[in-house]
Amino acid sequence: MAPKIAIVFYSMYGHIRKLAEAEKAGIEKAGGTCDMFQIPETLPKEVLAKMYAPGQPGDIPLLEDPATLEQYDAFLLGIPTRYGNFPAQWKTFWDKTGGQWMKGSYYGKMAGFFISTASLGGGQESTAIAAMSTLTHHGIIYVPLGFAKASEQMSDLAEVHGGSPWGAGTFTSGDGSRQPSAKELEIANAQGASFYETVAKYTG
Ligand SMILES: Cc1cc2nc3c(=O)[nH]c(=O)nc-3n(C[C@H](O)[C@H](O)[C@H](O)COP(=O)(O)O)c2cc1C
């Protein structure tokens, strides 16, 4: 049976959402399907206004209840970096998963990451490493992107690009004006496809 995959992301300004869509296209290219969810906002409206946050789009369901993920085999998690780590919105979600942790409801499921930072050195790898602790405590198996499936794009130094063996990535610039490049979207697409193939191999 084809594996059930959820793409779960938080995106304040839309960069991670664009990577999420490229990941989804990659899963579909490889013959799979997936469902998309957004991590709910936790900041007050007044703070969001000061951050020029446009608000969460209404076309992708909010993941309010962690039990929803129990029915999936694997998750691709989209994380915009905060201080080299995942944001409070993501932490709030994980902090609601004590029941799943107690029962082992996520144990043995698989997960990968894709990440956005403002800049080079802004913490794409450190965010993935920090998030791995949460996976580890749940017994969720980390599936890295590795190099092999997007080595041409990742090793091309002719232009600035995000993404690493830890997962696809984009650079947004400090004011958010940079959008995911074609190369970064290709890496995200390759990750979607390879993630699906890996999960299918071990859950089929
Ligand atoms: C409070 C805060 C902390 C941030 N910390 C970092 C950081 O450590 N490194 C970095 O490169 N970018 C940092 N950023 C920029 C975000 O990573 C960037 O806005 C985000 O990746 C954009 O993704 P989105 O459009 O999907 O929301 C920070 C942004 C905020 C608001």
Image (spheres, rainbow, N blue to C red):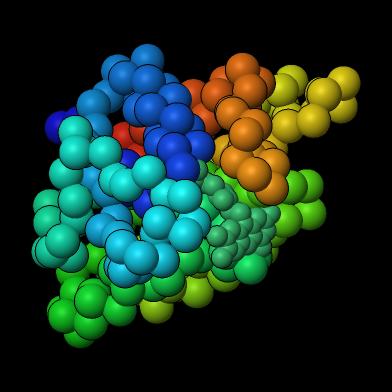
**Quadrant of the rendered image holding ligand 1:** bottom right
Front residue of 153 and 124: 124
* Residue 79 placement (x, y as % from top left): 48, 53
**What is the quadrant of the N terminus in the image?**
top left
Does 78 sit above or below residue 180?
Answer: below
- Outermost residue on the right side: it is 158
Q: Is residue 105 visible?
A: yes
Tell whether 9 sits left or right of 40: right
Residue drawn at point x = 19 percent, y = 51 percent: 62
Tell whether 38 sits left or right of 162: left
* Residue 18 placement (x, y as % from top left): 45, 30
Residue drawn at point x = 47 percent, y = 50 percent: 52
Does 86 sit above or below residue 202?
Answer: below
Residue drawn at point x = 51 percent, y = 65 percent: 86
Instruction: Quadrant for residue 179, please give it.
Output: top right
Q: Can residue 70 be seen in this view?
A: no
* Residue 85 placement (x, y as % from top left): 58, 67
